[in-house]
Image: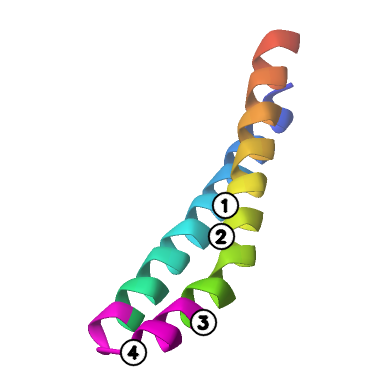
Amino acid sequence: MDSLIWSGAAISVAGLVGLMWCIIRVARARKAGLSDDELRAAVQKVMPLNLGSLFVSVIGLMLVIVGIFLG
């Protein structure tokens, strides 16, 4: 069960890296002084990756919990 815990932690970290990348990308778009429509388009472009990263992070945390319960 240790492998399940560590693989879940690795998957969760990968999701967190994706979330951090989304935050950095939107922050750069805001600093660029884009117009309202361009900023909205940039945020909409990042949104699927943001949700996917959140999903991956949650799945990783669920694997950690399952590994703890089974171990």
Q: Name the amino acid, label 2.
A: Asn
Q: Mark on residue 50?
A: 2
Residue 29, percent from left and from top? 35, 82
Report, in whole angstroms, how far the alpha carbon at label 3 lies from the one at label 4. 10 Å
Q: Which mark is residue 35?
A: 4
Q: Nearer the viewer, residue 19 or 68?
A: 19
Say whether residue 71 is visible: no
- Label 2 to label 3: alpha-carbon separation: 14 Å
**Real-space CA distance between mark 1 and mark 4, rounded to the nearest whole angstrom:** 30 Å
User: For the magenta stretch, what is the residue range?
Assistant: 30-41
Secondary structure at numbered mark 1: helix
Q: CA distance from mark 3 to mark 1?
A: 23 Å
Q: Amino acid at mark 4?
A: Ser
Categorize mark 3 by other alpha carbons within 10 Å: few (<14), some (14-19), many (20+): few
Quadrant of the snapshot with the C terminus: top right
Residue lying at 66% horizontally and 48% vertically, measured from the top left: 56
Disc 3 is placed on an element classified as helix
The residue nearer to you, when weighing 22 against 11, is 22
Residue 46 visible from this viewpoint? yes
